Each structure stands twice: as structure tokens, then as C-alpha cells.
Amino acid sequence: MRPAQEGGSRFGIVLNGSPLFTGGAGSGESEIRRYVLENDLVEAIVGLPTDMFYNTGIATYVWILSNKKPAVRKGKVQLIDASSYWQKMRKSLGSKRKEMSDAHIATVTQLFGSFAEAEQVSVFDAQGQPMGEPQLIVAGAAWPAEFQNLPEGGRLKRVPISRIFKNQDFGYTTLTVERPLRDEAGAVVLGQKGKQKGKPQPDSALRDTENVPLTEDIDAYFQREVLPHAPDAWIDTEKSKVGYEIPFNRHFYVFEPPRSLQAIDEELKTVTARIMKMLGELAE
């Protein structure tokens, strides 16, 4: 990259999903993520549709790296989920079956340029059928009238498209939680030599790890999540490691509540009645 003192630079890298999360704290992959995030080099990550490339159908992501971030982007990362922005190709090219239209590209470019959170909003009627095309709503913008006056029994479906996070939101500390080794009588085994003299010795069979977000106090987390279940536990601070991961899909997941049991039961009764009617007609 051109040094920031000489004007800096910005570029994009197309990668699969594994660089977002592969490798635990201290691994090579995690250390690369840590470097680019702690040095504030990640400007945005754009999730592309599947089936976009000739020799693979897997999901891909564009990492936009920059060492000349404007002030408003300092210390932050924008995630854009463009996986729904595609149209079917008239003729497939190997595994490439989808493409982004000029309108799709313009929308993603606008989201990146505006550096704002946004969501895609759809209206569904009482029967669950979509009413019209989904609309992109940028945070802070006025909502269309049809979203404010829903039909009877209708509902809105809101799906995030653009989200903004602080760099440290993706970091965590992996703690090694130890518990004491006990002898046959149940007494805690103490060290006999060196720095461990008089100290409880850890039981490797009971050793566990905890990932604590960088934004949370480690002691408070330990008091709340560990000690109530293992009062004799302690943290081996020498083994603590800082890691980074970007759970892209988790940040755009929208929970869809299942249908009620009553609705499912009514549908089963309708289908069963239809099948019995057909069987009766065959028997005649």
C-alpha cells in the first residue's frame, strides 16, 4: 500500500468466507485479522451472492482495505450484505449462474459511500404473501406511507443490509480457566517447588477456555459466568490470548418465528381431508 504520508491507497480483495473466522486466538489467521483491525485498515466488507464465479459456487466477500480513511470512518468497519442483490444469467458459465446488475452495483456503491446503516423492508399481507417489492430504508430516512399503514393482519419484515461496528467489537480474549487437582482424599494438591510452591496445581482434565469480548471487563465476566458454577476456578493469565473474528452472517441473521401449532394443525386437517376424499374417489 502507498504510505499514508504519500496519499495512501484503497483496494479490494475477493476472499471466501473462511478468513472471516478461521483460526482461534493466537493463530496465523486471527493474527492477520488482529493486525488489519487494530491498525484500522479495514474499511468495509461486502458479502456477495453465491454462484458468482466460474469455478465455484461458494459465497465470497470483498474486503475493502484503506490506510486513508476519512475521519467519520476512523475506528469503524462497515459490513454490507449484498447476497440478495443478483439476477439469473441467461446462460450459465460453469458454476457462475448469477450476476449483479448495474442497479445492484449502484445500490451497494451508494451504501458504501453514504456510510450509513440500512435495512430492506418488505410488507406481507395476512396470508403471508409479499405486497410489492422490498424497499431499502437508510437509517434516519422517512418511511414510505405503505409501511406506516399496514393492511389488516399484515406485517413488516426488516432485514439489515448495512451495519457499522467499532473495530474492537470483533475482538475477544481467550481465557484459560483452571481448576485444582485433588488427591484420592479430595484434598487440593499443592506445588512443592519453585514458583508453584504452596499454590494449587491445575487439573488438565478440568481445564477449559472462555472467550470474553474486548468490550467487556474480564473480572466481571469471570465473576458472573464462571465462579457461580466453579467456585474454585481461576484464570491462568500467562495463557490469555487476544483474537479477532468477524461473524458476518450472525450480524445479518433475522429470526423467523415458526408458525403456531394451531395453524399447522389446521393445515394438516385440510390436507388429510383432501387425501381421504381422493382415496374415496379411487375406491368408487
Image (cartoon, rainbow, N blue to C red):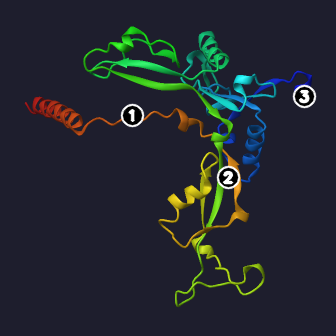
- Which quarter of the figure is the N terminus placed in? top right
Q: Give the structural element (helix, strand or loop) at label 3.
A: loop
Observer able to see residue 103:
yes
For disc 1, the marked residue is 256
Q: Amino acid at mark 3?
A: Pro
Residue at far left of view = 284
Q: Is residue 100 left or right of residue 271?
A: right
Q: How many marks?
A: 3
Q: Could you tell me residue 182's position as x and y percent?
A: 57, 83
Would you identify the image quadrant in which residue 280 lies? top left
Which callout, 1 or 2, points at the residue further toward the start of the chain?
A: 2
Which tag is nearer the camera, tag 2 or tag 3?
3
Would you identify the image quadrant in which residue 189 lies? bottom right
- Which quarter of the figure is the C terminus placed in? top left
Q: Amino acid at mark 2?
A: Gly
Which tag is nearer the camera, tag 3 or tag 1?
3
Q: Residues within 10 Å of mark 2 (few under 14, many from 20)?
A: some
Q: CA distance from mark 3 to mark 1?
A: 46 Å
Which residue corresponds to the image point at 54% horizontal and 90% vertical from the top-left?
184
Q: Amino acid at mark 1?
A: Glu
For disc 2, the marked residue is 24
For disc 3, the marked residue is 3
Is residue 154 or residue 142 the one in the foreground? Answer: 142
- Look at the picture and state if 100 lies above or below 40: above
**Mark 3 in CB contact with mark 1 (< 8 angstroms):** no
Is residue 52 or residue 229 the one in the foreground? Answer: 229
Q: CA distance from mark 1 to mark 2?
A: 30 Å
Is residue 264 or residue 153 the one in the foreground? Answer: 153
